[in-house]
């Protein structure tokens, strides 16, 4: 099983994901450059966080046109698994692999801190092992993390069980006060209708090492391995 991590100019969380996959979980990882035209037989693709192409225009708007994204879109449309984290989530929305868009935070400031999210479903490659009654402490780090979609799209996301995470407080209450960026309905992560494309703003790779005194993010990776039938 090969995991591919796409690296764009401005990516700064690529090596965090590579470290977690390679060092913590001992998986085979392939680094994919944004100008590549080949996914090198990878079975699962990660789009990491950062500031692809400097976040000019809109976050992810330029990265969406990278040569590698043509291959990622084809891969996803064939049913291949793709996960975007933070900037990766923004890129997936810009590429129309996920519905909606990520807008500037309500306070128009960059936010970098721990957040809590409550899993909304176990029916996804990234949440199959998560406890829906447990708030998970996972860091956020973004300036454009406010998830927005039309009322019709949000209704479809809810009806199809595509909302994966909602921001909550430490006790698991989903409130306006617990919403760090103004995301509609506190949405922090979603999947597509086929459930093979996942996007989330919080960074599970930043909460997967004992050295950080927080391993809540490990369960996201363990869910992926379970769904792909890869031993943890």
Image: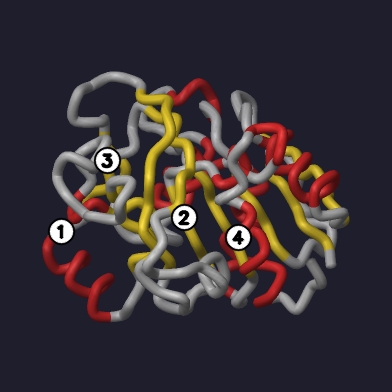
Residue 165's place in the image compared with 31, above or below, is below
Closest to the camera, between mark 2 and mark 4, is 4
Mark 2 to mark 1: distance in Å? 18 Å
Foreground residue, 32 or 162? 162
Q: Please rate how many residues cluster around mark 1, counting C-alpha atoms within 10 Å: few if below 14, some from 14 to 19, many from 20.
A: few
Residue that label 2 marks: 199
Residue 30's place in the image compared with 52, above or below, is below
Q: Residue at x 46, y 55 (%)?
A: 199
Mark 1 to mark 4: distance in Å? 31 Å
Judging from the image, what secondary structure is the residue with disc 4 in? Answer: helix
Number of the label disc, if any, that sits on residue 150:
1
* Sequence-first disc among 2 and 1: 1
Residue that label 3 marks: 146
Mark 2 to mark 4: distance in Å? 16 Å
Q: Are marks 1 and 3 in contact (CB under 8 Å)?
A: no
Q: Is residue 64 visible?
A: no
Closest to the camera, between mark 1 and mark 4, is 4
Number of the label disc, if any, that sits on residue 125:
none
Mark 2 to mark 3: distance in Å? 13 Å
Number of the label disc, if any, that sits on residue 219:
4
* Sequence-first disc among 1 and 4: 1
Q: Residue at x 54, y 74 (%)?
A: 128
Foreground residue, 172 or 156? 172
């Amino acid at each position: 099983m090969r995991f591919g991590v796409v690296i764009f100019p401005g990516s700064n969380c690529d090596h965090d994901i590579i470290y977690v996959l390679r060092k913590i979980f001992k998986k085979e990882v392939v680094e994919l450059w944004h100008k590549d035209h080949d996914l090198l037989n990878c079975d699962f693709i990660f789009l990491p966080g950062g500031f692809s192409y400097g976040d000019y225009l809109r976050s992810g708007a330029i990265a969406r046109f990278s040569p590698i994204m043509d291959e990622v879109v084809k891969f996803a449309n064939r049913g291949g698994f793709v996960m975007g984290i933070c900037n990766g989530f923004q890129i997936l929305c810009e590429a129309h692999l996920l519905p909606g868009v990520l807008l500037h935070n309500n306070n128009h400031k960059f936010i970098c801190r721990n957040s809590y999210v409550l899993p909304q479903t176990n029916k996804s490659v990234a949440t199959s092992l998560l406890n829906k009654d447990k708030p998970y402490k996972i860091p956020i780090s973004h300036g454009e993390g406010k998830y927005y979609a039309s009322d019709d799209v949000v209704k479809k996301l809810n009806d199809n069980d595509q909302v994966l995470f909602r921001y909550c407080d430490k006790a698991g209450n989903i409130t306006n006060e617990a919403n760090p960026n103004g995301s509609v309905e506190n949405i922090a992560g979603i999947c597509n209708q086929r459930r093979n494309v996942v996007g989330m703003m919080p960074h599970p790779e930043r909460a997967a090492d004992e050295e950080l005194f927080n391993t809540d993010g490990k369960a996201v990776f363990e869910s992926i391995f379970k769904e792909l039938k890869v031993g943890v």
